[in-house]
Amino acid sequence: MPGSLRRPYDRIVVAAPVTIPYARYSIKSAHWWIGRALKALTEAAGITVRDIDGFCVSSFTLGMDTGIGLTQHFGLCVRWLDHIPLGGASAIAALRRAARAVEAHDADIIACVAGDTNHTDSFRRTLENFSRFSSDAVYPHGAGGANGSFALIARNYMRTYGVKREDLGRIAVSQRANALRNPHALMKTPLTLEQYMAARPIADPIHLFDCVMPCAGAEAFLVMREETAKALGITGAKLLGTIERHNAFGNDPMQVRGGWAMDIDDLYGMAGVKPDDMDFVQTYDDYPVISMMQFEDLGFCKKGEGADFVRGHDLTIDGDFPHNTSGGQLSAGQAGAAGAYIGVTEALRQVLGTAGPTQVKNAKIGLASGFGMINYDRGLSSGAAILAGAAS
Amino acid sequence: MTEPLVRPRRKNPLARTRLPTLPPQWRSRTSHELTRAAAEGRFALQCCAACGHFTYPARDACPVCLSDELVFKDAPHGGTVLSETTLHIPADVYFRERAPWRIGLVKLDAGPTMVAHLHGDSKEGDTVRMSLQIDKAGQPVAFAQPQTETPHMSDDKQWREMTADPKFRRVLVTNGRTVIGQEVVRAMKEAGASIIFVGIADAWKPFPGEAALRAMEGVTIVPLNTADEKSTFDLAADIGAKIDILVNTSEHIRGGGLLDRHGTSTSVDEIEQSYMAFLHLAQAFGPVMRMRGADGVNSAVAWVNILSVYAFANWPQFGQYSAVQAACLSLSQCLRAELRPGGVRVMNVFTGPLDTEWFQTVPPPKLAPRVLATGLVRGLKNGLEDAFIGDVAEEVRQRFAANPKALERELGQ
């Protein structure tokens, strides 16, 4: 196992995982959802809003507001502020930045929050105005949004590596089984592989159950030093290692791998662990094919072996490779930028032993990853973090 | 293989006319260089003057060397389809109404990859010919199609959205008295137009070519004097809702500049026969064409003006004529903007001197009316917005793009 030249995190903990239960549509604003998450953070940690001295927010639906507007909106007086527009990679990026900030005492308690509302036209508006490259060169070609772009990636990946729809179906079906144990998941009915295969096409080879359901919701956690947590009387998960990468492998004509593949030695080296040590994995699952890509790029199998890997493992909570134990975005819902956080907050609950009905037995250490921003023809941002419980 | 288009049946008069919707319209300012190329039917991409790399989508700095000297220039139009998808549930009304819709990711021979509309006869792994097209919103999009002709290729559903092919469409040629009008009728007929209405003013006055015109199958002579507001509105009331392509062949050419022409009666005539005629036509036929932009196989699709390339820079030998043409060019831009909500395109066909009696004293090269008509139809079939036909028009286009001041001076000598 190669080491890492990066400085290890010095007793940095991540605490108070918060999920504001999702709603398919909401007439509330993103501010309301983020406000609920902040309130829940203070309650979970037994603090007041005045104890928060660092704030990091991600959202697609704040309109003209950014982090600074929110400080006044929520009565926050902070000495460290960030606003991360990295979509599905926002949570890992938030975690990394907040960790170094509290480590350096630039702040003591940082609230990392992502929240979005979902009005009936929010999703289309987000698609329309996603990025300049997208508006110039993608959206006018069929207006398929993420479905169209990921369909192109998925089809090429499936052909290149001999992946069948059934293989991707295993990921979706297992996650649905997990979601049925999560009372907050929007999807509440079982999904069989037959139903998955029979679903209507959205953008070939993407079919209905390959797609997330856009919804409203918020997710959040606190980042602090271990001593701060101790003083507050709360338990946090240890942050062992992280990676982040943007616009990796730009010369690959089509995306068959993400930035993780560039950085995994660093990730495991920094944490001093190997893929086999993970008790569970929470990947960024905007589409099952992206989760499969992560199994490869995060070192659980070799490139091109993702299909074999899912055929050979049980991805449910009680299986030998518990994956997206909350149901993930595919079955719990995609609450905008909170979709980046869902894997991190679930990972925190798992290692803290507070996951309740979705708890993996004896989960001590796990991995959460992020993936975001299909600016033109590929997802640009990737990240991952390894978190461990207090006992490990 | 492309399913050939079926001749549309007569429209049920009780059926609701489907209203036009448009594909997504926003583009960055830099991307409008692609609009310029698409309008003229060129495949141009940004190329870095410092390092020579082609880039796409449009950027403001080269991603290889960060130079800001990104110049749009004609690029090799070959490519290979890396991946494709069929969109069944697009997010936007225009595409949802037209789904399933196919797109592909194309690796260009020039280097970059391009998301493109995919012709029905092109699939994953195929080599393709790329083009930039003007879509119904008037904005540039990429289109990939087979490199060699396939059967009924131009009937492809997605290609037809990008073009104004006369096949099975009903055409109004506004003036059939002239050779140009008659050649346009002939070219439209060859292109498969279903009905060609031909405007004739003062039908009692005979004109050359009349017998042949009247004998042509599918041609309907209609009374039209475009310089007369009432005549134009009367015809629009009668057949306006049946016109899919309007070709404004109003033609009034008189030599002479400013100082050596005495009085204004000739000038007033020029304005009435060209500018006012265009205005009458636009006000009479424009609104109903805009309504019918999505009315099935034979929807309203294009408005064509035949303009002198000296609309761009005055040619003093035909100085007042040039000025009226410039006014018509300006008006065409207004019409283009106002027809856009209907998805109806305005194509301007620019010519140099024509091989007709009014340019008798001008030395060659002069454009044969038949070549003009063929080029006009080719422009419609390829979905152009600005078609420069003939060597003189093409030369003036290039000289105007290179240095308008030099062009002005040289035309004045």
Image (spheres, coloured by chain):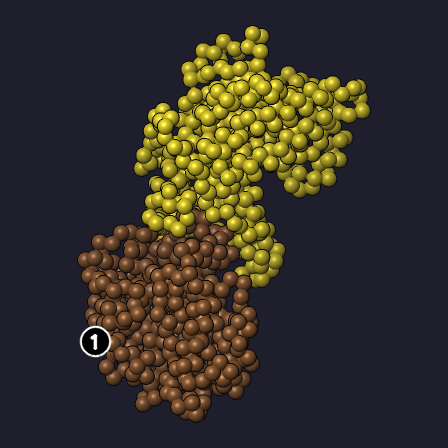
Chain colours: A brown, B yellow
Mark 1 falls on what kind of element?
loop
Query: Residue at 39% of width from left, 62% of height from top?
Result: A26
Query: Residue at 53% of width from left, 11% of height from top?
Result: B209
Query: Residue at 32% of width from left, 59% of height from top?
Result: A211
Quarter of the rendering containing residue A336:
bottom left
Q: Give the quarter of the figure containing the N terminus of chain A.
A: bottom left
Q: Position of residue B235 (x, y in %)?
A: 52, 20
Query: Residue at 75% of width from left, 35% of height from top?
Result: B409
Q: Position of residue B80 (x, y in %)?
A: 40, 49
Quarter of the rendering containing residue A92:
bottom left
Tell which of A243 and A192 is nearer to you. Answer: A192
Quarter of the rendering containing residue A248:
bottom left
Tell which of B150 and B239 is nearer to you. Answer: B239
Tell which subunit mark 1 falls on.
Answer: A
Give the residue at mark 1: A318
Whether residue A269 is visible: no
Tell which of A86 and B375 is nearer to you. Answer: A86
Amino acid type, callout 1: Asp
Image position of B64 with respect to B87: above or below: below
Q: Give the quarter of the figure containing the C terminus of chain A.
A: bottom left
Whether residue A70 is visible: yes
Q: Is residue A144 left or right of residue B34?
A: left
Image position of A26 with respect to A94: above or below: above
